[in-house]
Each structure stands twice: as structure tokens, then as C-alpha cells.
Amino acid sequence: MTIITSKSNNLIKKTKKLLQKKYRQESYLIEGWHLFEEAQNSGETFLHIFVLEEMAERLPNVTNVTLVTNDVLKELTDSPTPQGIVAEVTMPHRELEELQAGRYLVLEDIQDPGNLGTMIRTADAAGLDGVIVSNKSADIYNQKTLRSMQGSHFHLPIWRTDVIRACQQLQIVGVPVMATTLSQQSVDFRVIQNPSHFALVMGNEGQGISKEMAELADDLLHITMLGKAESLNVAVATGIVLFSLI
Amino acid sequence: MTIITSKSNNLIKKTKKLLQKKYRQESYLIEGWHLFEEAQNSGETFLHIFVLEEMAERLPNVTNVTLVTNDVLKELTDSPTPQGIVAEVTMPHRELEELQAGRYLVLEDIQDPGNLGTMIRTADAAGLDGVIVSNKSADIYNQKTLRSMQGSHFHLPIWRTDVIRACQQLQIVGVPVMATTLSQQSVDFRVIQNPSHFALVMGNEGQGISKEMAELADDLLHITMLGKAESLNVAVATGIVLFSLI
């Protein structure tokens, strides 16, 4: 097998573009052995696997393998400490019609990739049926989001869509929409006890949920705070409410 | 009032050193109006206040004010978008003997400044009596920690100390030590119902709590996870358990 040693190799130049959101239409890059193994366990399709020559023997029996040098590999990730493997994975596309009765986390315009990834990981740990992410949220396939998610996007379906339409669709199939708000004109989250189905909506870090979402929601929830903090981090708030609901 | 326009001014050079942990023995820097106002509301002592000339009128009646140019102010913060004010604040020192019966969060070797700050902010929102941070944890007065804390360190006391000794001290005054673990050889956190006092211990992101802490603890707790995620982010886990305990 040949080894790519030049950063100006055409395949490398083309693949490197996937680090920019505008080029991520059909595929994205994952970095490191942990994510690679998660992807493999989930039966993902690898379009390309770039691996350091000295680590190639760690690879199971897979195709589409390209050997690269360390300098070339570094071109394909923004991680300061790449772990020897980068893979190009097919991006799933999901339709609103696939939404069925179940338990969902809905993220409306989450700005920070770290928060977005942590919230999807939390939904996974809570055993939810899926996560719905608004079009204006941070990108799911941003390398920072991927690091925070720790592979959870391979464990549960994620819809990137118009969250208002998604919530309306869920209401049609009998799922109550519960939106969190900082306003005290809402019930404490502990009032809701073990709902069989729900769509829990968390809003933007600064602005909270949209007016439209507040009007659409079946229930408005807040977390009663006892100290002097003005708010909780949105990922922490997600964990508190989700693990109370399940 | 004169205005400092040179980065090589001696006061600026001396103050700038406070961005490095080794120079933060007696004081530290806060950046931005929100933190400045939180500090003022908490009656903190300002050793110096550095403010842009055009923003000086926003300042209340305070002493130790130094006008600076934008370039000089940028020397005093690692924020990419400084908001016109940096202040040097006296660092509190607390003794173990001050620990009384109450509700505490104990952080053992938390590595990430963002996690550390978010956890202290969560303890504040839960109305706890204080936070105890191990000597090996990230620095409380790191600018990243300060941004995540959002002023919570002005709302509740923080001890930076030997957490084993602190927990022994709390046990002496009748506070049960509850340590979270990833091991299933422990009880689900929901089993513990509304304890009047507690010291909840959260461990290092990768390693969890120390062996010594596990032996010392009165209760070992875990969060039962339902999905395929291997773990939760430590700040999210803190929120889930704390808001169940209070």
C-alpha cells in the first residue's frame, strides 16, 4: 500500500475541506480510535480511513484505508493531539415523518458546540429515542461537538430540522412538548412525574426558547434555584430535568 | 486623571503577571462589567480597577481607578473580546476549621477549568453552603474558570485544600460524605432522599474519585444510565445528583 506524504495531495486537499461546515453535505470527519471504534460498532460507512503507517495493524479488516504521515494526518483534524486515525463517515439524513411517539430532547438554537455535544451525550445516557436540533444550532459535525458527544450520535438518531415543525409533528402523534424557561410563569420541573412520552425543549444559552416555541409548548417548566446564581449552564440544566423526567 | 498608554508601564507589567497562576498568591484579575458588578455587590476589595477612558463614567464611586487604552487593557486579560474593565481583587483564604454542618460540593482533582467553573456555578444555583476544591484541581482564578463560574465564587465560600482532610473534618461535625463513582458497587443516587446535610464528592474526569476517598465515604453513589453512553460529563452529573439531593 502506498503512503501519502504530501499535504498537497489531491485527496488530502479535498478531505481537509470537510473541516469547514460549508463542505459537509454528505460526509464528515471523525478523529481518534475511540470514535472510530464507536462508528464501526454502529455499522457506519467509511468513505476513507486515514491512518499512520505504524498504527495500521490496529485496524480491523476494513477497506478504503489510506496510509499517511503524521504531518499529513494533522491536516485532517483540528485536534492539537491527533491519535493516529481520521475517518470520513457518511452523514445520515432523517425525515420528520420518521418521528414516532417516544422521548426526545429538542435543542433550539444552541450556540456552543461543547454544550451541544454534551447535551446529546446526556440524552444518550438518559436512554432517549432521539434528539432534534434546530437549523440555527451549532453544527453537529463540528470537531468540538464531536469531541463532546463522545460517539453518542452513533447511538441515537438526530434530526437537524425546523424544531417548531418537528414539535408539531410530535404533538400529532401524542407527545407532549415540555419547554424549559427562565420565567417563573411556569411549573417547577419536579411537578412532571414520569411521563411515558415527552419532547423536552432547551433553548439558546442567552435568549432561552423562542416565543413561538413557548406558545406551542404543552407545558412550560423551570428549575427552581435556591442560591444567588442567575442561571445554570444549559447542559447542566438539561441533565437535571432529563434525569428527573425518566 | 492620567491614562496609561504603554504596555511597558510598570504597573501594567506587574498586573499582567497575575494571568499566570504562579503569581496569584494574594490577588487575581476579573474581566468585564458583569463580574465587576458581582464583585462590588459582594463587597470585594479592589486593589486596582483598569478601565477604558470612555467607559469610566459607568464606574460607581470607587477608588484605585486607572484609565488605560484598549491595547493596554488587552494585556490584562486573555478574553478575545474584553469589555472595557479589568479589576484586581483580593483572594480570600479560608481555614478548614471554618467548616460547619451544612451542604457542600467537594471536587477532587477536576482537570478542566470550564467544568470546575460550571460545577461551582451549579453548587451556587443549588443553594449549597460551600465548595471544597482539591489542591490538584484546575485553578479557581484561571480566566476560563472565572468565565464559567459567572460570579458564583462571590456567592458562596470556596476552600482550596486537602479534600480528604476536609471530608474528615465534615464527618466530625456530623456531615455524611457521599461520593459518586462509575462503579455499580454503589447505590443509585435517587435512593438518598433529602439529607439535611451532605458533602457530595465528584472526582476527576478520567479517573473518578481516589481510592482514599472511596474508603472514607459514608455512601457511594452512581447515576444509573439507560442508553449507550459510557459516562456523563462531570458537570452534568453534578447537576443531576445535586438537584436530586436538595
Image (tube, coloured by chain):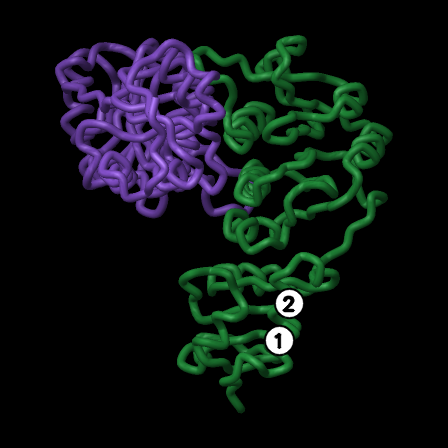
Chain colours: A purple, B green
Q: Residue at x 73, y 26 (%)?
A: B210
Q: Residue at x 24, y 10 (%)?
A: A101
Q: Quadrant of the image for the C terminus of chain A?
A: top left
In this rendering, is residue B114 above or below B72?
Answer: above
Which residue position holds label 1? B13
- In the image, taking residue B160 as reference, residue B88 lies left or right, namely left
Residue A176 visible here = yes
Q: Are marks 2 and 1 on the same chain?
A: yes
Secondary structure under tag 1 reads helix
The amino acid sitting under disc 1 is Lys
Q: Chain of mark 2?
A: B
Crowdedness near tag 2: few (<14), some (14–19) or many (≥20) residues, C-alpha within 10 Å: some
Q: Position of residue A5 (x, y in %)?
A: 36, 37
- In the image, taking residue A65 as reference, residue B96 lies left or right, namely right
Crowdedness near tag 1: few (<14), some (14–19) or many (≥20) residues, C-alpha within 10 Å: some
Q: Position of residue B233 (x, y in %)?
A: 51, 29
Which residue position holds label 2? B17
Residue that protrudes farthest toward the bottom in the picture: B1
Foreground pick, B147 / A82 = A82
Q: Quadrant of residue B177?
A: top right
Q: Quadrant of residue A156?
A: top left
Q: Chain of mark 1?
A: B
Secondary structure under tag 2 reads helix
Residue A137 visible here = no
- In the image, taking residue B99 as reference, residue B113 lies left or right, namely left
The amino acid sitting under disc 2 is Lys
CA–CA distance in space, label 2 to label 1: 7 Å
Q: Position of residue A39 (x, y in %)?
A: 36, 17
In this rendering, is residue A17 above or below B79?
Answer: above
Q: Are marks 2 and 1 in contact (CB under 8 Å)?
A: yes
